[in-house]
Amino acid sequence: MPKISRLEFFRRLAGLNHREFAKKLGVAPTNVSLIERGYRKPWPAFKERAAAVLRVDYETLWGDNPLLDQILSGELIPGAGGGKNERAS
């Protein structure tokens, strides 16, 4: 599991804290925290609204994206030279 969830990453990128983001979504800040940490599954309306509020493509936020998950987990650092994950030219 990533060190930081995609939801948390894009929320922070948007400059929103839990309370601000929750208010825009119309949910309790606790729900945002639980979903970000993987303790609660997001419901369909939450997913759609979160993508819209964060101005992120739905598939980028919620779809299958192993590369983004590797980056968020710290397994793959883009541009870091000499790592085992670096591709040869």
Image (spheres, grey):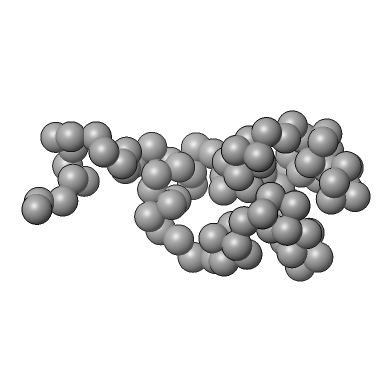
Q: Residue at x 57, y 66 (%)?
A: 59
The correct choice, above or below, for 50 with respect to 86 in the image is below
Residue 11, quarter of picture: top right
Q: Quadrant of residue 56?
A: bottom right
Residue 37 showing in the rendered view: no
Q: In this view, does 87 lie to the left or right of 69?
A: left
Residue 30: x, y in percent?
82, 39
Q: Is residue 11 visible?
A: yes
The correct choice, above or below, for 52 with respect to 6 in the image is below
Residue at the left extreme of this rendering? 89
Q: In which quarter of the image is residue 83?
A: top left
Q: Horizontal and vertical percent for residue 34?
A: 74, 43
Labels in figure, total: 0
Residue 4 location (% of width, % of height): 54, 39
In the image, is 34 to the left or to the right of 83? right
Residue at 44%, 51% (x, y): give it.
69
Give whichever of 52, 4 is nearer the camera: 52
Q: Which residue is drawn at 24% across and 34% down?
A: 80
Place of residue 51 in the rendered image (x, y in percent of width and height, measured from the top left): 69, 58
Q: Residue at x 67, y 54 (%)?
A: 55
